[in-house]
Amino acid sequence: MNGPGQAPRGLTVTIGGLPGTGTTTLCKLLQDRLSLPYTYAGALFREEAKARGLDLAAFGALSQKDPSIDERLDDRQVHMLRKGGLILEGRLSGWLAQRYKLPAVKVWVQCEEAERLRRIVDRDGGTLKEQADATWAREQSEADRYRRYYGVDLRDTSFYDLVLDSTHKLPAQLADEVVAAAQAWQHHAASHKGR
């Protein structure tokens, strides 16, 4: 039996969004609110880059030429999604759950570009122009890879259970919305169990 605030085994929440939308902050709040472990798919990418002795830009460029890199990282995400019972943050995590028909509350977070860039500068430093250029290059590289490898357009949010805009909302408000969606999902799953 699960206590108050504890998620039943198997609840899976995917959180995706472009850099600066607040996905990591949201995931950390949800980790406490839903009592679920949290995995950041970007950390898997960073681990692989480090293991190869490359910075993120160089590893991203290598990933553009070698689809097996994304395939391995995505296989790790699919494995986690199949096990369930976690919060998985990644731009493709919701799409992977959808593609493989894995049960999950799929959330996409969006935010106005100027606010995203302001947040990235506050978090990582640098000038607005430096961060805008770096963010644009990263997003273009990822969008190109996702389109070529999977036929995915990150602008298509039609399959998400919840699309949130973090531009003018506090992280706690976003977390409330995700928790409500997770509770509705759990209720639906429980009422259809055994049918």
Image (cartoon, rainbow, N blue to C red):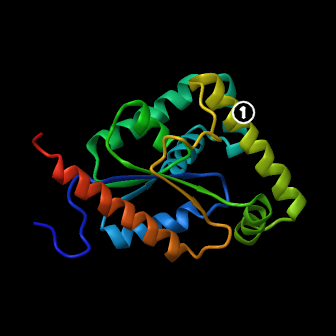
Disc 1 target residue: 61
Q: Nearer the viewer, residue 150 or 191?
A: 191
Q: Answer left or right for 195 relative to 50.
A: left
Image height of 168 relative to 100, above or below: below
Q: Assign the N terminus to one quadrant of the image.
A: bottom left
- Residue 144 drawn at (x, y percent): 70, 30
Q: Residue at x 65, y 23 (%)?
A: 148
- Residue 59 drawn at (x, y percent): 66, 37
Quadrant of residue 182 in the image? bottom left
* Residue 66 seen by the camera: no
* Residue 140 seen by the camera: yes
Image height of 42 relative to 75, above or below: below
Q: Answer left or right for 93 relative to 36.
A: right
Image height of 113 relative to 75, above or below: below
Element type at mark 1:
helix
Q: Nearer the viewer, residue 30 or 170?
A: 170
- Residue 61 drawn at (x, y percent): 72, 33
